[in-house]
Image (cartoon, rainbow, N blue to C red):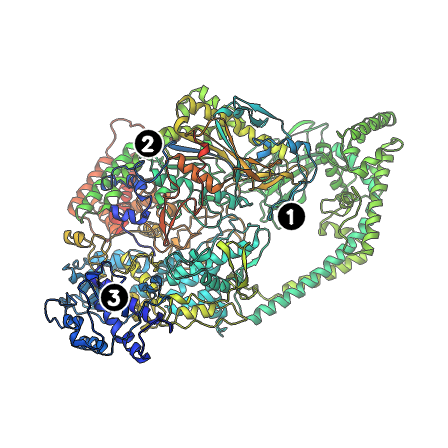
Amino acid sequence: MTHFRPLPHSRRELLRASGAGFGMLALSGLARSLGLQDQVLPETRGSLGSPWPVRAKRVIFLFMHGGPSQVDTFDYKPLLHRDNGKPLPFDKPRIQFAETGNLLESPWKFAQHGQSGAWVSELFPEVARHVDKLCFVKSLWGTNEAHGGALLALHTGSATFVRPSMGSWIVYGLGSENENLPGFITICPTLGHGGVGNWSSAFLPGIYQGTPIGNASVPAKEARFANSSRGDVTRETQRAGLDLLAEENRAHLARHSADAALDARIASFELAFRMQTEAPRAMDLSGETPETLKLYGIDEKTTENFGRQCLLARRFAEAGVRFIQCTHSYKWDQHENLKAGHEQNAREVDLPIAGLLADLEARGLLEDTLVIWGGEFGRTPTAQGMDGRDHNPHGFTMWLAGGGTKRGLSYGSTDDYGFFARDDKVHIHDFHATLLALLGLDHERLTWRYAGRDFRLTDVSGRVVSELFA
Amino acid sequence: MGLRETLSKTLLVAIALCSQASPSAAHPQGQSESDLEFFESKVRPLLVDRCYECHASTSKRIKGDFKLDTYDDLLLGGENGAVVVPGDPKSSRLIQAIHYDGDLRMPPKAELAKAEIAILEDWVERGLPMPRTAPESAKPAALHWAFQPVSNPKPPAVRDAAWCSNDIDRFILAGLEAIDLEPAPRADRATLLRRLSLDLIGLPPSPSELARFQADLSPGAWEREVDRLLASPHYGERWGRAWLDLARYSDSNGLDENLAMGTAWRYRDWVVRALNDDLTYDKFLTWQLAGDLCPEPADTQALRDQLTATGFLVLGPKMLAEQDKEKLVLDVVDEQMDVAFRTFQGLTMGCARCHDHKFDPISQRDYTAVAGIFSSTASMANLGFVSRWNERQLAPKAQIQTRLEAEARRDKAKQALEDLRARAADSLLLHWTADTAAYLLAATAAARSAVIVEAEDFSRGNLIRDDSTYGSPGSVIARQGTGGLQFAEYDLTFQAQGRQVLEVRMAAEDSRPMRVLLDGALVFESALAEKTGSWKLDGQRWFKVGALDARSGRNVLRLERDGSVPHLDQLLLYPESGAGEGAGWPVAGNALAAGLEPVLLRAWTLRLESAEHKQDPIFGLWTRFALLPAAEFEPRARALTAELRAARDDKSFEQNPLVIRLLEGAPPVSLSELAGRYQVLISGVDAQWRELHAKDPKAERVPGEGAEALRLLVHGKESPFHLAASEMEPLVPEATRTEIVALRGAFEASERALPPEIDAALGVADDAEIAGLPLMKRGNHLDKSPQPVARGVPASIATKVTSPKIPEFQSGRLELAQWMLDPEHPLTSRVAVNRLWQGHFGSGLVRSSSNFGLRGDPPSNPELLDWLAREFVRRHWSMKSMHKLICMSSAYQCASEVRADMELADPTNRLFSHQNRRRLDAEQLRDGLLFASGSLDLSIGGSLLEIKNAEYVTNDQSKDAARYDAPRRSLYLPIIRNAMLDLFSAFDYPDPSMTVEQRPSTTSPIQALYLMNSPLVLTASSKLAKTAIDSRGDARARVDLLYESTHGRAPAKDEVDRALGFIARATAPRAEELPRTNIGQEAGAKPAEDAAARESEAWSLLAQVLLVSNEFLFVD
């Protein structure tokens, strides 16, 4: 019911909640967030638990909400062109979102790029310049053919039940590198299709939930943390109020026996005051050079919004935020109007993404920052209506960059038409296991005891696709 | 684990063994059933109680390598050899030891009672009757303490009996005395009343209540407060909210399709009412699982309550758009079972969906048996593309039937009306189709002089384009921005000066009249005030605004309104014809003369206008020819025909296959000749369709390539011949119109005759297919066993309870509930009283209050738990009675201070030597802020959700339609899954998708930011400050008032000094201008402009400090 449960204020209690397995690793993060680092073991990451070395220290997830088409972007299928208009020569999935017709060729030309010779369609001319930094996974697959389920599966590993988001798991495992900012930030996330469920910490402590900046209906320019400032008093006046509060609270504490919760509360105001300074500073782009703004496309109407998101992501990464998500809002869902729709979508993100990759590389951040690009599923190579493609969770493409992934690799494949993942299949659970491994976390040991069971991001499956590692 | 715990645990183990011993279990020859009965009833409990701590396979360390589990164990003896000689007590070392006769003295801590010694002697004498080996079925899991019957412990003797207010205290004190710990002293009276008040009603006491209690030193004062608060209608709100955490209460579905569950609030209000009425827990449980299966009560309110309670089963989040509908249903069943068993049984059934439970004695077969009960229950109303949950009408069957019959009569009348309208429309259509060529020609002429603008293509404005209308991709309307003046301006160019008629197509559910201005001058004060029945596409209608005096050249047309506007779609302007009233359309005289209908002509004009801009597979060809100048039509048409033929062949010009045939043969000689060809084509398809339909009324389309599209041009909803009923009626013949009026009258009368609509609430029904489910390998519904598992209960968790017979034609939910409520059921009462305890102490006797299984925590005071469980049943499951019992105990009234010896002996307060300090939860915080600032509205019940049932609460554009600004208690704010109020998500409000046994209580900077900057806190602070400034003059008195309102006490001397010092500093005139703003903030904060503003700012800050201080946030 609804009463205060004392904070886990001993190492023993922490361990109890985090299970016998991975708990120790996660401790440092949890403890730091609660201001309790003195009360737990010194940082033990690397010495306990995970067989994987730390390759990446943080993640930037560029989420393309709606489901971009793999066969129109990065998964080149010559046979799809040849057999345009013919029926798919094999069975379609048992469950489909809608009925689709015959094969529909891509309206865009593909060409090979870079040393790696990776195929990229005309939709991504700018990203194509960076293909040698990318590590393509062309054999992803999931099971949910509706947006809501697929979003939740991608973000939490479960399309059916409420589970912590991958960002929450990661911050639980690693803590934040910056005490003055949340460890998990999601920029302009969607409130539909699972909404908060996609960045909630579920049964993990609330401190691991994603902190949203704005939401999909707010332009990136206007997106802010909630309650990050008040405009009615000066900073000094507010400081004076907080000083009085601290005095009051210390006097209150003196009247009572020592209590970690009361202590932590006093500390939290100081932390918040610092955050109040740090967050606007991290989000203030006024100090960026015109060249940087141009690099991200912030000077152009089409690319301004996602460009800002990408630049914010870089700034947060620099500031030590663990998991940053940028969401390109729900536009990739081209059941019809594929040509115009995908063209517009790609134009909005192509330059900003290329800018982000170039900028991270130039600043030496790409080394230990893992960038992920992808949607909740791909699209059918068969046509929906005249000029559309339906949802397709059975085979789609994502790419990774930096963070210890192999440059210029293309891993896995779909069938000849790009419908089903075929070789070296990578399930969403495998993707999660791999993601954690890149961060030096063992997906089987990053657990939390809840309702009598040790839960993990990958449920009871997940294969680390170590072939992707540099 | 303490000694007491261990003993009790093993006692329970023993009882399980006894019940588990199957007839096949081996035991020594010659042992009679009565001997074995003697062993199980007399000996085993004794062994368990006094010996098994050290001498059983379940012991942590087996001492002396000697076990007393089985006959074989006894004969084997220990490290020093044999221990008993069957039939010969005197020679048995065991008997010598229990007599404390010699070196070996057992049990070591305390001698057995004489009677107990006699029992064991008797036992040895009888030849050690007991099972030879452990029965196979007695897996350790089944021996778990929680699955054993509730014991009937007597309150133990204690040294300091005077401390005890009631029997609870004897158990608590005995536990403390066993480790020589003294309980904390009684808390002071102010602390006590604040604790009790927040505990029982969720609100702090008012200053006057505090004063009264502090002054009342009579013996019954505390009890009077307990009674007063338990009788308060806010008690149900406080404890109801706790229950809602378990019931994962929410006003929206969450998961993928976040639809408003617009009737969920009835369940919430029922919970509040049920608790206020002290509905006994047995009924409380039964109704939630099976209220619909209980006998229908005569009292309507009781019936409503019983049905509403089953909303418990429907509240869960569901993947409504899951396209594997079988999976959807099984997931719903799984969610229901998980919540029901965790809530009522403290068990995690969900684990057994895919395999036998790893820890608890629940097999996959058990899971499947229970799942069959829930899958035989209808929880979904339909399994459409986006499925819909079930709701129940809250009325007696007869009343529902009456309403249904009236609805059927209404539907029949409506059908008759619609049939007649359809027949009338069809005969009109036949007539109009014959004029297709005339319409084409007239509309083409009209389109040349008309201006058509999409509403969202405004030149300037602050309206927002919205193309998210669900189910209608591409639909485009303009709608409101964020409030204030809404407007759109259109730059329009006309060839010549003259009067232009303005028509607008829009949808509006409410009347939202707009002002119309032309070049800045107001022309119409209140236009477009009509309501069309919906905001969506289906509600769009054309409305004639009136005529405007337009100049030649550029004109600025402006539509505006203070506040939200109708959903505008298109604007149409055309020159006012001189033909007089009623013509209303720029129609060539011959068209009017030909009897063309203006309203159809408008539709045709729009269609042709759009064909010029968008690819139109039927009129693309027409528009090309229509552009040709009449004077040189023939030669130009010849060239165009050749050009289009070539384009047709290389597929760069695509048209409907029948239309493109119009290019064959001789090129058209005039536009009217081409119009004739179109008419022949369209009438031909129509005739073909009519013939087909006459033969086969079920036919849905015309065969042949391209034909169906042409049929739809005439008969489809998008057809320019399609008219709304109201537009069509004036055009039908007089006789038919009279008939329509009569039928409409009958229909309207049938509507008026409908009995009032019946309220509905989330609820289940037993009208699903009633059958057991098959086993599913790894929980996969695509891999089923052939035979279904019979529906049933997980018997192995309650072996003393007879498993119910599940009726053939009912789901079995009622039997499941009755089984849970069997007085011998080991979990139900324990789980329930533990939750009450947790609510009063911050942690349960069993800390994992929704998991009493093997992975849960053991009880810290098992005897107390069992005693409370028995007491609960003895008190006829009255929850209020248990609250009172707990609140009257000395244990409850202890101070929350932790002494050093407590910290040392029992660092996590498992034995409740003191109260636990707790932080206010999210609701208490908000309610407390509103309460302290005098703005809390304490009215009870009702819905604040402004979204219609089953509408989307958050759409793809991430707009959250819920509102949270009512000053009502937080319990009543909309709970929207996926989009929680920021206060709630910051302050550990549970995820409303999951059943939550206990809220965590974290400390985070996000909370601090909320307390520092949120509008809620700032508003409450300034309101409270204003009260202080307004009410009394002097600063000292204001400080007193602030402390009284926030902390319920007068400030101490140092506090007054601190506060006054702060105010003095904060109101002092500022020597120099300080930097004005927080970094990165756009709007600069102005320092207080004058003394009054500075004063109000200073007092607001002081009020805020007190409102967010630890003394306010924590309950001692």
Quadrant in the picture for residue A405: top left
Q: Looking at the picture, does residue B774 appear above or below residue A90?
A: below
Instruction: Sort mark 2 into few (<14), some (14-19) or many (20+) by Cα contacts within 10 Å.
Output: some
Q: Looking at the picture, does residue B378 appear above or below residue B439?
A: below
Q: Quadrant of the C terminus of chain A?
A: top left
Distance between the alpha carbons at the discs numbered 2 and 1: 50 Å
The numbered mark, 1 or 3, whose residue comes first in the sequence reads: 3
> In the rendered structure, which amino acid carries the disc numbered 2?
Thr
> In the rendered structure, which amino acid carries the disc numbered 3?
Ser
> In the rendered structure, which amino acid carries the disc numbered 1?
Asp
- Residue B538 is labelled as 1
Q: Judge by depth and name the residue closer to the eye, B790 or B964.
A: B790
Give the chain of mark 2: A
Instruction: Verify CB contact (< 8 Å) between mark 2 and mark 1.
Output: no
**Location of residue B27 in the rendering, given as x and y in whole percent from the top left corner:** 32, 73
Label 2 sits on residue: A277
